[in-house]
Image (cartoon, grey):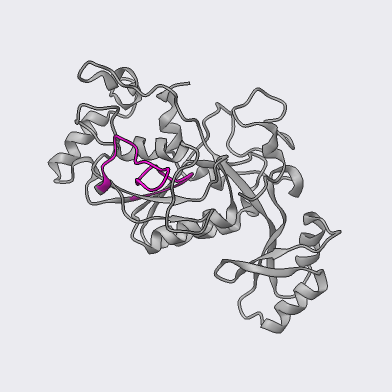
Amino acid sequence: MRILRIPLLLAGVAALALAASAPVDAAPYRSGEVIVRYAEGTSQAQADAALQNTGTAAAETAGPGAQVLRIRDGHSVRSTIHELNHQPGVTYAVPNYIAHAAGFVPNDPGRGRTAGGWQSVQWNFLAATGIDAPDAWANAAALGAPGGRGVTVAVLDTGVAYENRGAFRRSPDFSASTFVPGYDFVDLNSHPDDRNGHGTFIAGVIAESTNNGRGLTGLAYGARVMPVRVLDADGLGDAVSIGRGIRWAVQHGARVVNLSLEFDPSTPRSQIPEVLNAIRYAHARGVVVVAASGNEAERAIGTAASACPRATRARRWPPRTCRPPRRS
């Protein structure tokens, strides 16, 4: 597959917001973990009692007023959620669902020898067949913001090839000045280097150097990129990491947050509240959030078609996405 489906990667947040009800065990989530949120005014004693009654233990903070809990041996996620949702002071308890990178990483570098040859690859940037990027670029330049200059876009993904450090190298069609400091919510450090390639591809679609006689073009080539790693080397990441990543990006100056990732279609919106709460947090602060609408020609967004929709079809993502992946 080529770059013909890039626009789908940068679509609206509907992929996260529209989903039908589904069984708790229908989509992948972190094994042995539950996210719980307490009602405002719940005392520490009530929270401790809820944990004691269900045999869970607080492990870490998931967001304001929410915790990630570890489940005791012999108890399932389903039974623990049922118990927690019947405890006083608990607003909700949900699994820590897994998302995966949307779309693909093309193997064609698009290195033509003819000036303007990017059009044969990025035809979806053109007026007749796509979004009319040339006119958009002209309008932005006329307004004094060529390529979206002055805007910081947080790319929440598998990381970005943004620095020369150890075995890592900056992608050759990026300049060092393209990037602002980011964070790695997978390995919990300040070096969100890409171990997969998907995040670098998305960053390139957004802000790859343009009109430099090299490679392809970036739709917002004047913008700066904030790499935020929330997906691991396999392109998998959980709801807690994604929610934290959104909040961190907003708090550190991002004006746009890009989520080229998707949860399993059987995951209803009610089961990823930390992600939705983080999106609301961003919106309340004037930050634009864009997300993948899907890149596999599904007829609906986030439907509960089956317990393991990708296990029974020839899909890009293997059946392993129907069970919780190991922590990286």
Would you say 13 lies left or right of 110 here?
right
Q: Is residue 304 visible?
A: no
- The image quarter containing residue 283 is bottom left
Q: Position of residue 226 (x, y in %)?
A: 36, 51
Would you say 143 lies left or right of 83 here?
left
Q: Position of residue 173 (x, y in %)?
A: 29, 35
Magenta region, mostly helix, strand or loop?
loop
Establish if 12 lies above or below 257: above
Comparing 132 with 208, the one in front is 208
- Magenta residue span: 153-176
- The image quarter containing residue 172 is top left
Would you say 10 lies left or right of 269 here?
left
- Most distant residue in the front direction: 166
Q: Please report the residue visible at 30 percent of the width from the left and 49 percent of the height from the top.
A: 179
Establish if 147 lies above or below 120: below
- The image quarter containing residue 43 is bottom right
